[in-house]
Image (spheres, helix red, strand yellow):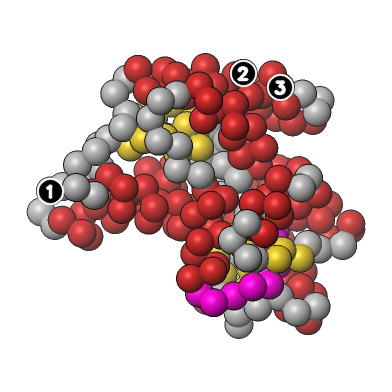
Amino acid sequence: MKTIGLLGGMSWESTAVYYRLLNEAVRARTGGHHSAPIVLESVDFHDIHRFQHDDDWASAGDYLASAARRIEAAGADMLLLCTNTMHIVAPAIEDAVSIPFLNLLDATGEAIANADQTTVGLLGTRFTVEMPFYREKLRGHGVEARTPDAADRQTVHDIIYEELCQGVISDASRDKFLQIIEKLRQSGAEGIIAGCTEIGLLINQRDLSIPLFDTTQIHVNTAVDAAMAD
């Protein structure tokens, strides 16, 4: 089995979910005492948060590229960036290493296309839903993403940073998410992308009447497929 490299810590709350899901998936597929070979570099989210809010994506790319090189040097056979938003700087990370970079956005686009959906709602940080990188990547898979209005985008952003990244799970915030999702459904969304790795901490498929594309789970499935391939 190949070794999976995780570039995480953005936030560590969701990186912990990656670690658990990867090991659960490997155990489910192989049985016994098997677990996933993993190299994990968990960065200080304070630094990333500062780059994001200073609009300093070049420094963010350099910072994460350096971390990616350390993961490769530690023996990883592939690399996952355990965050949706920071795929803004995915090209800098991919250029920094020679091992395969398993792009979360491509994995998500493929999963939606395989589900025969073409129009979905996208929930995530302000950076994810307002900057073009995510929607453009999805269009490459024949998927059109609709986003909440400005007020709802800010609500989702604030809940992610002020609550979910801090390990706070609130029923009131779940209700706000579900109200926003219902607006997207009424606007024509056939499914919803949980376009932030922390969103799965707050809502799951049982909460929705339309398909939920949990990007963390999709990314994990892609990684395990690659790790177990001949």
Which secondary structure lies at badge 3? helix
Seen at 40% across and 25% down, the residue is 98
- Identified by mark 1, the residue type is His
Q: CA distance from mark 1 to mark 3?
A: 42 Å
Seen at 71% across and 75% down, the residue is 189
Pointer 1 or 3: first along the chain: 1
Which secondary structure lies at badge 1? loop
Q: Which residues are magenta?
A: 115-123
Seen at 74% across and 31% down, the residue is 52
Front residue (pair 38, 223): 223
Instruction: Work out which quarter of the rendered image holds the N terminus and state it.
Output: top left
Q: Circle 1 sits on which residue?
A: 33
Above or below 138: residue 99? above
Q: Is 224 left, or right, of 46 in this rendering? A: left
Q: Are marks 3 and 2 in contact (CB under 8 Å)?
A: yes
Q: CA distance from mark 3 to mark 2?
A: 6 Å
Q: Is 27 left, or right, of 224 in this rendering? A: left
Pick out the residue farthest to the left: 32
- Identified by mark 3, the residue type is Ala
Pointer 1 or 2: first along the chain: 1
Q: Is 49 left, or right, of 220 in this rendering? A: right
- Image position, residue 147 (x, y; %): 78, 62
